[in-house]
Amino acid sequence: MGDNLGYLLGRRVGTVLLVWLEQQKRFRWITLPALAQSQAYFRRRGGWAIFMTRVLFSALGGSINLLAGLEQYPYRSFLLWDVIGEALGALIPLSLGYIFAESWEEAASLFGAFSALLFALLAAIVFSILLVRKMLQRRRASAFQDEGNQTSQELETLTQL
């Protein structure tokens, strides 16, 4: 019921709220082209967002429900992804509880080690992406500077003639 209520609120009140926010001068990033782009993006990827907020990122579920309604995401698709995500989100912990019922202490230490490994891997990926971006940024700046030096040398040559 909560997911459907959030969707309904986004569908009924969200559009009015966005129109009001667009009229305010403080929110310059809310424009009609930005809203159209957001709606197109959510139509493409909204199903996965709804599903993932039911299975892995449940804290974001309420805002995704509002956003789905706001973006006029089709209700049948919303309901399909919502039910599949909720079912899988309940089935996984129940299955793990049934499997590890006798040895929950060992399972807790195993999951703790796994989550630490997953966090370290995620941190390494994020650090690598930031490092590559920084290297590309420096390379572009260096190429731009070399181009500027070459242009100034050509200007000096032309002025000497």
Image: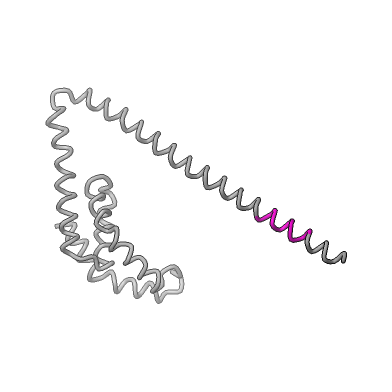
Q: Is residue 115 left or right of residue 33?
A: left
- Name which quarter of the figure residue 121 lies in: top left
**Where 130 sits versus 76, above or below?**
above
Give the colouring mode of the picture: one colour
Tally of numbered discs: 0
Which stretch did the figure color magenta? 144-153
In the rendered view of the protein, which quadrant contains the N terminus?
bottom left
* SS majority, magenta: helix
Specify the quadrant that holds the C terminus: bottom right
Please say if 123 is above or below 23: above
Say left or right for 69 vs 117: left
Q: Position of residue 76 (x, y in %)?
A: 15, 63
x, y percent for residue 79: 16, 59
Give the image location of residue 32, x and y in percent. Answer: 38, 74
Q: Is residue 15 above or below residue 60?
A: below
* Residue 133 belongs to the span the image colors magenta: no
Quadrant of residue 119 within the rendered picture: top left
State the image quarter where residue 94 is shown: top left
Between 14 and 42, which is closer to the camera in this rendering? 42
Q: Residue at x 15, y 57 (%)?
A: 80
- Does residue 6 appear left or right of residue 37 in this picture? left
**x, y percentage for residue 154?**
78, 61
Instruction: Please give the name of the residue rendered at 13% of the width and 27% of the height, measured from the top-left corner.
Output: 101
Instruction: Please say whether residue 150 is one of the residues in the magenta stretch.
Output: yes
Measured along the vertical axis of the image, is residue 97 above or below residue 79? above
Foreground pick, 64 / 128: 128
- Which residue is rendered at x = 16% and y = 27% of the image? 100
The residue at the point 14 percent across, 47 percent down is: 87
